[in-house]
Amino acid sequence: MTENPVADNAKLTPSQRTPVSKVDIETATVGGARPLNASVYLAEYDMAWPEAFVREAARIRQVLGDAAKSIEHVGSTSVPGLAAKPIIDIVMEVANSRDESAYVTRLEQHGYKLRIREPDWFEHRVLKGPDADINLHVFTIGCPEIERMLMFRNHLRANATDRNHYEAAKRELASRQWAYIQNYADAKTDVIEEIIARAVKTPAD
């Protein structure tokens, strides 16, 4: 095994890490997955979402200091005008996301909870916040998935056609019944990959 978790997983694509079964989802979820068995609620864009990110990012930086190499607002709540689940997605780079003692322990002392551990997909971790409804995604610095997240966000911010296309796809998928919220997230893979492919060809200024 190499010492670089990014290098270990750099050739994986989102479709290769999709948890397609209940067992897969339960294995990745710390403390057990919570079934949804319902459709997904999408809220209209809220101007308070960027403000919530700023507050949460400041708190994370206060807890972790230099251990937080970068903190970015990602996901649909980071795109003005886009409907979204009212959960703030945040991506953070650390020196080595596999080393939970370097960041999870300190965050948990301040009320955060580790919920997702995916060692086979870029050593991805997700923590929930102590009060604000967030998903704090953690990757090792330089992980290519962070670049993809930011590219997708920036493209949707700049391209109204793809933003509307993505929202229409999300609304259709959200209207269906899903056993787990992860199943809904996985179902968006095709439209996300389609949009990212266009973003690569026409990068935002």
Image: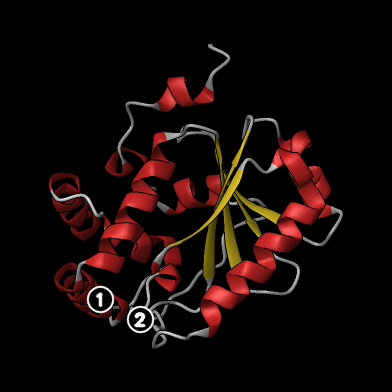
Question: In screen coordinates, is 127 left or right of 176?
Answer: right
Q: Is residue 39 above or below residue 25?
A: below
Quarter-of-image position of residue 52? bottom right
Q: Residue 116 at x, y = what percent?
A: 58, 50
Looking at the rendered structure, the number of numbered marks drawn on it comes to 2
Residue receiving disc 2: 83
| Residue nearer the viewer, 181 or 12 | 12
Tell me the element at label 2.
loop
Report the colour scheme.
secondary structure
Q: Is residue 186 visible?
A: no
Q: Position of residue 123 (x, y in %)?
A: 54, 34
Q: Earlier in the sequence, mark 1 or mark 2?
A: 2
Residue placed farthest to the right in the image?
A: 109
Which of the two residues, 149 or 87, is positioned nearer the viewer here?
149
Amino acid type, mark 1? Glu
**Amino acid identity at mark 2:** Ala
- The CA distance from mark 1 to mark 2 is 7 Å
Quick check: marks 1 and 2 in contact, CB under 8 Å?
yes
Q: Quadrant of residue 146?
A: top left
**Disc 1 residue crowd, few under 14, some 14–19, many 20+, Cα 10 Å:** some
Judging depth in this view, the residue of 52 and 108 nearest the camera is 52
What residue is rendered at 57% in x and 60% in y?
A: 33
In the rendered view, would you say 44 is above or below 143? Answer: below
Outermost residue toward the front in this view = 205
Which residue appears at 54% of the width and 69% of the height? 88
Q: Residue at x 77, y 45 (%)?
A: 65
Q: Which residue is mark 1?
A: 167
Position of 135 compared to 62: left or right?
Answer: left
Give neighbour class at mark 2: few <14, some 14-19, many 20+ (Cα, 10 Å): many
User: In the rendered image, is residue 196 in sight?
Assistant: yes
